[in-house]
Image: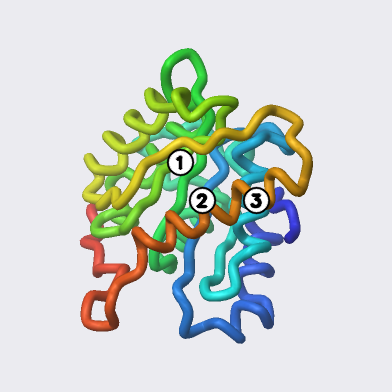
Amino acid sequence: MAWFNSAASACREWNSPRAERVERAMRVLAIAGSVARNSSNSRLLHAMAAASDSVHVQVWQALDRLPYFRPDAEGDSEVTWLRQAVSGADAVCIATPEYAGGMPGALKNALDWLVGSGELYGKRIVVMSAAPSEQRGGNARRWVREVVQMQGAEVLDSFTVALPPGASDPLVGAVAETALARSLGALVVTDEAPLAQAAPHAK
């Protein structure tokens, strides 16, 4: 699974033949909450994407490419792509580390860019954190939950998985399978209850 460093590469993956093969399957946008290229949370999401056969999981790892949020600006192409990706996804998975008792500023900046445009309204969300202990990450997850719920999202689950820094690939893969199973368990719904609801577009 490619490491997404720009909107262009992310769009290519979203529209790849693999995406066409599973166009009827659930589409999950997985947002990596750390700007570090090899963070535990980023590795977790990429391993989840690689392990997923029943849904199309797309990892977005470009928080550092977003401009600072300005409520009087429309944003650049990366902001536009993020809004379109969130809007087009059936669900969103956010994996965040905890910095100084909260979520990283770069992740908050990304969520701020979705304020007012309505992409998170009615969207189903799973929030997770990869940390050395399952007792850590709770403050960051609570903050993410509050922010997305303020925008009308529905948080279906929030949990921390134990993943030590520098964990081996097999360990990351095993933890990812557990996280994926729990996430899908929260996201699975019937055809009569579609995941994505129409979102009002606020001006």
Out of 110 and 189, give the one closest to the viewer. 189
Q: Is residue 120 left or right of residue 63?
A: left
Residue 179 tag number = 2
The secondary structure type at the circle numbered 3 is helix
Quarter holding residue 159 = top left
Q: Amino acid at mark 2?
A: Ala
Q: Does residue 47 show up?
A: yes
Q: Are marks 1 and 2 in contact (CB under 8 Å)?
A: yes
Q: Earlier in the sequence, mark 1 or mark 2?
A: 1
The secondary structure type at the circle numbered 2 is helix
Question: Marks 1 and 2, Cα distance to the nearest angstrom?
Answer: 8 Å
Query: What residue appears at the point 32 percent right and 53 percent down from the top-left corner?
Result: 120
Which circle, 1 or 3, is nearer the viewer? 3
Q: Which residue is mark 1?
A: 128
Q: Which residue is mark 3?
A: 174
Colour mapping: rainbow
Location of residue 52 in the rendering, given as x and y in whole percent from the top left corner: 59, 67
Q: Is residue 126 left or right of residue 134?
A: left
Q: Earlier in the sequence, mark 1 or mark 3?
A: 1
Location of residue 153 in the rendering, given as x and y in whole percent from the top left corner: 27, 51
Q: Amino acid at mark 1?
A: Met
Q: Is residue 114 left or right of residue 5?
A: left
Q: Are marks 3 and 2 in contact (CB under 8 Å)?
A: no
Query: What residue appears at the point 70 percent right and 28 percent down from the top-left corner?
Result: 165
Q: Is residue 132 left or right of residue 149?
A: right
Give the total of numbered labels.
3
Q: Earlier in the sequence, mark 3 or mark 2?
A: 3
